[in-house]
Image (cartoon, rainbow, N blue to C red):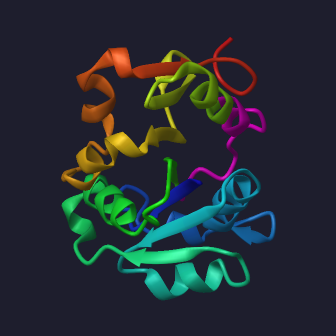
Amino acid sequence: MIAAIVLAAGFARRMGRQKLLLNLQGKAVVRWAVERLLPHVEDVVVVTGQDDVPVREALAGLAVRYAVNANPQSGQGSSIAVGVGALKPWTRAVLIALGDQPRIPDGVVPRVLEAFARSGKVIVVPVYRGAQGTPALFAAEVFPELRGLTGDAGARSIVQARPERLVEVRGPGADR
């Protein structure tokens, strides 16, 4: 099974208000982000924090599960660890996505999944304008490393630690 973790526990410090809940063309930003992933995966875990109730309300009616990060101030790494801890034991790989990324280009998720299936690599990341981005895919063998994350850097340290495990995806929606 391929799952997705949507990170929705941030404090939105730079913006001054919760951008996940902003209305974008009639829906909350976080709902757009989740709906972009649902057709491509079999399980979605949304990691919430201090805004747990309003995020759940914004996602009402969607087939998702929730995991609450009790210490979201510890950074994105802690939310990834919480999300991975909530995955079902038979999960083969997980896409890690941001709840404030409502406009993932159409071809990106299918291309990431295809690269995972073809490459034999355990980490797949899309590249946008020369930089690695999200949603990034991690195979189950990387889950123990993800469960140990802390801080604000997310999974960047894991992606960069052993480049031989990585395949970058370029193409529609990502770099050409």
Tell me the residue at 50%/39% (across/down): 137
**Closest to the observer: 24 or 5?**
5
**Closest to the observer: 150 or 144?**
144
Task: Characterize the magenta stretch by its predominant secondary structure.
Answer: loop
Above or below residue 172? Residue 74 is below
x, y percentage for residue 170?
63, 17
- What quarter of the picture does the N terminus occupy? bottom right
User: Quick check: 8 left or right of 41?
Assistant: left
Tell me the residue at 68%/11% (across/down): 176
User: Quick check: 147 left or right of 125?
Assistant: left
Regarding residue 10, the answer to whether it shows in the image is no
x, y percentage for residue 111?
69, 29
**Corner quadrant of residue 165:** top left
x, y percentage for residue 110?
72, 36
Q: Give the residue at the far top of this rendering.
A: 176
Above or below residue 78? Residue 159 is above
Regarding residue 109, the answer to whether it shows in the image is yes
* Count of marks overlaid on the render: 0
User: Quick check: 91 left or right of 39?
Assistant: left
Q: Give the residue at the far front of this rendering.
A: 90
Q: Which residues are magenta?
A: 99-111
Tell me the residue at 50%/68% (across/down): 46
User: Quick check: 45 left or right of 114?
Assistant: left
x, y percentage for residue 18?
48, 69
Tell me the residue at 56%/83% (across/down): 56
